[in-house]
Image (cartoon, grey):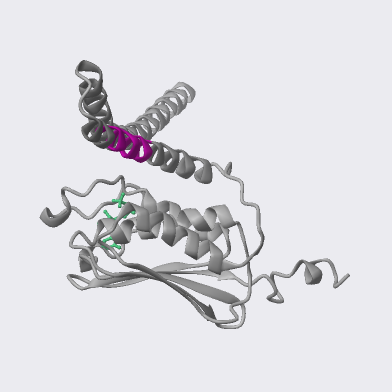
Amino acid sequence: LGSLADQVAVALRNALAHLEIYQTLKKLQEVDQLKSELINTVSHELRTPLASVLGFAELLLKKPPGEAKAQKYIATIYHESQRLTNLINNFLDLQRIENGRLDFTKKSVDLEPLLQSSAEIYRKQSQAHAITVEVETGLPPVLTDPDRVLQIIGNLLSNAIKYSPQGGPIRLKAIRRGAASVQVSVADQGLGIPKEARDQIFKPFYRVDNSERRQIGGTGLGLAICRRMVEILGGEIWFESEPGKGSVFHFTLPLAESPAASPLHANGGK
Ligand code: ADP
């Protein structure tokens, strides 16, 4: 009887070991698939601007064109290189955020100049979109990391431009919200967000895939980065949208002088 019990115990142990190996293998397979998806997306997005940089550099090298043409080629090389840099930075940022290795240095920040300079940068990128800035009079400063806020607004403005392919107004706005925060909004009159995509839009690598936006480049990382950054900065992000009419993205930031955020209160009112 003893030996039968031993045999059962050995068989059970073997079965458990197999199950464990099977589960580990399954997990590895899932990780592997995620990695391939990531590599596919990133490599596709890297190849397109790189091909353009190589093509125009080759043209310049082979037979120097007239000055006007050369300027055009160089401008394209410059913009495509910028696109590549953005993509790589976005990808690395998301990685660093997920690993808790991205620095957030908060201080008291006046939003108006920050919004103005964001708008100015994106006005240069697109003449087809009239970008306006409205800041509520007397808006108090927020406690935040200005570089990260620039990045969040930059991602939202760049989407507003990309997904309004016919051009149109884009409004960047900041107002007081409740007792302790400020709300920043970016409104466009572009393609809008289909109902079935609403729950997915902030997930990494998620992109709306339909015929009207297949030509628009992107990685699906922009909004995922925005959401993580806003959360770390102590705010919330959400959107309203009507397909075919446009979208408004909103996020909040805590006020510098709100009772909960003030360092004066944090160390006992010293
Ligand atoms: P990307 O723009 O690189 O695809 P994002 O994470 O910034 O990635 O956006 C995810 C998806 O959400 C986009 O593919 C796009 O379809 C949709 N989207 C984002 N912003 C807008 C907008 N302002 N108007 C319409 N669709 C948008």
Q: Nearer the viewer, residue 12 or 40?
A: 40
* Residue at (61% x, 77% y) in the render: 180
For residue 46, side relative to residue 178 (left or right): left
The vertical placement of 28 against 137, above or below, is above
Q: Is residue 1 left or right of residue 55?
A: right
Residue 31 drawn at (x, y percent): 36, 35
Ligand 1 located in image quadrant: bottom left
Residue 30 visible to an observer of this rendering: no
Residue 105 in picture, x, y percent from top left: 65, 52
Q: Above or below — where is 227 with respect to 69?
A: below
Q: Relative to residue 186, is residue 61 drawn left or right?
A: left
Residue 67 visible within the image: yes
Query: Residue 241 at x, y = what percent?
Result: 28, 72
Above or below: residue 112 compared with residue 72: below
**In which image quadrant can residue 186 be found?**
bottom left
Region in magenta: 73-84
What is the magenta segment's predominant secondary structure? helix
Residue 82 inside the magenta-drawn segment: yes
